[in-house]
Image (cartoon, rainbow, N blue to C red):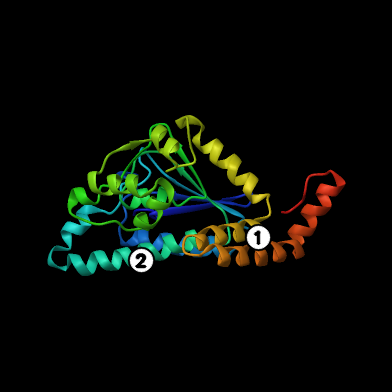
C-alpha cells in the first residue's frame, strides 16, 4: 500500500510538509491535490504550528501535473484537469493566505505546478542542484498554481513572458539573482538552513508576520492611499497586541523579546 502523497511532521512549532511521491517525481495527481489542501488547512488551524516548511523527497521537488493521468483521462481531459486544478488551487491559496510564515526548501528540479509551489514561500531556498522550468507550453498547456500571478511580481513581466513562452530553464544561481527565489544554498545544507529559518520565524511575532503577509498580498492590487490606510490600521493593531507590547518592552529593557 502506498503512503500519503504528502507527509506532515511537526517539530518544535515547525510543520514539515514533504512531497512524498519520489517514484513519480512528486507530480501532482488528485490525491496529492486533496492532501495539500487538507494539510494546508491543518497548518493554518493548529495553534501549536507557528511556521511551515514545504519540501520534496528524492531528487526532485515537484515536476508538476501527472501527465500520465492527463493522458488517461482521454476525452474527459477538460473536466478531469479542471477538477484537479481547482482542488490543487484550494491548497495553494490556503498556504498563501494562512497566518503562518511559509518556507519552501526546493531540493531539486521544479517544473509546472512544482514551480508554482516552489515560489510560494515567504522565504524560498533553492538547493544548488535545483532548476526551474515553466514547462506548460511545451505540452500545449497554460499555467496553474498561481504561476501567472506570482512570476510577473517576482521577476517582472519580460522574464515571466520568457519563462512561460520559451520554457527556458533557470538554474538555482540565476533564480536567486533575478529574485525567483530568496537564495541558493548547497544541497547538503538545505534542510539545516530551512530548519534554522523556520525556527527563527516560529519564535518570532507570528501575528505581526501574518499581517505583513496580508499587506504584501493586498499591495498587488491596492493604490497607495488604500495601502497607507491598511498599514496604519495594521501597525496600530500590532502595537496594541501582546506581541507589540512585548517587543517594545524588550527593546527598552535591552533584552530579547519572548514572542512564542
* Residue at the spot 65% in from the left edge and 60% down from the top edge: 207
Helix, strand or loop for disc 2: helix
| Up/down of 183 relative to 247, above or below | above
Depth check, front residue: 141 or 71: 141
Look at mark 2 in the image and give the residue it sits on. 87
* Residue at the spot 38% in from the left edge and 54% down from the top edge: 5
* Circle 1 crowding by C-alpha within 10 Å: few under 14, some 14–19, many from 20: some
Helix, strand or loop for disc 1: helix
Look at mark 1 in the image and give the residue it sits on. 207
For the C terminus, give its image quadrant.
bottom right
| Up/down of 242 relative to 12, above or below | below
**Residue 14 at x, y percent in the picture:** 59, 50
- Answer left or right for 126 relative to 110: right
**Residue 20 at x, y percent in the picture:** 39, 49
* Circle 2 crowding by C-alpha within 10 Å: few under 14, some 14–19, many from 20: many
- Answer left or right for 246 relative to 145: right
Task: Compute the Cα span from label 1 to label 2.
Answer: 28 Å
Residue at the outermost front position: 225
* Residue at the spot 44% in from the left edge and 37% down from the top edge: 176
- Answer left or right for 30 relative to 117: left
- Answer left or right for 258 relative to 103: right
Depth check, front residue: 194 or 172: 172
**Residue 43 at x, y percent in the picture:** 54, 60
For the N terminus, give its image quadrant.
bottom left
Amino acid at each position: 500500500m502506498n503512503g500519503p502523497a504528502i507527509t506532515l511532521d511537526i517539530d518544535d512549532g515547525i510543520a514539515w510538509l514533504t512531497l512524498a511521491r519520489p517514484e513519480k517525481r512528486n507530480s501532482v495527481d488528485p490525491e496529492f491535490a486533496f492532501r495539500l489542501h487538507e494539510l494546508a488547512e491543518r497548518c493554518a488551524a493548529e495553534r501549536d504550528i507557528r511556521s511551515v516548511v514545504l519540501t520534496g523527497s528524492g531528487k526532485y521537488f515537484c515536476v508538476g501535473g501527472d501527465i500520465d493521468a492527463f493522458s488517461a483521462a482521454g476525452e474527459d481531459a477538460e473536466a478531469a484537469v479542471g477538477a484537479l486544478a481547482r482542488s490543487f488551487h484550494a491548497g495553494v491559496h490556503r498556504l498563501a493566505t494562512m497566518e503562518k510564515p511559509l518556507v519552501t526548501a526546493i531540493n531539486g528540479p521544479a517544473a509546472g505546478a512544482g514551480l508554482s509551489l516552489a515560489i510560494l514561500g515567504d522565504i524560498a531556498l533553492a538547493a544548488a542542484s535545483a532548476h526551474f522550468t515553466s514547462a506548460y507550453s511545451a505540452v500545449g498547456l497554460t499555467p496553474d498554481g498561481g504561476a501567472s500571478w506570482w512570476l510577473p511580481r517576482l521577476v517582472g513581466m519580460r522574464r515571466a513572458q520568457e519563462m512561460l513562452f520559451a520554457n527556458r530553464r533557470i538554474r538555482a544561481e540565476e533564480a536567486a539573482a533575478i529574485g525567483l527565489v530568496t537564495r541558493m544554498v548547497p544541497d547538503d545544507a538545505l534542510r539545516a538552513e530551512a530548519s534554522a529559518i523556520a525556527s527563527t520565524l516560529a519564535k518570532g511575532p507570528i501575528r505581526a508576520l501574518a499581517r505583513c503577509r496580508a499587506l504584501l498580498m493586498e499591495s498587488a492590487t491596492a493604490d497607495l492611499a488604500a495601502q497607507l490606510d491598511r498599514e496604519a490600521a495594521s501597525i496600530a493593531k500590532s502595537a496594541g497586541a501582546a506581541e507589540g507590547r512585548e517587543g517594545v518592552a524588550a527593546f527598552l529593557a535591552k533584552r530579547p523579546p519572548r514572542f512564542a
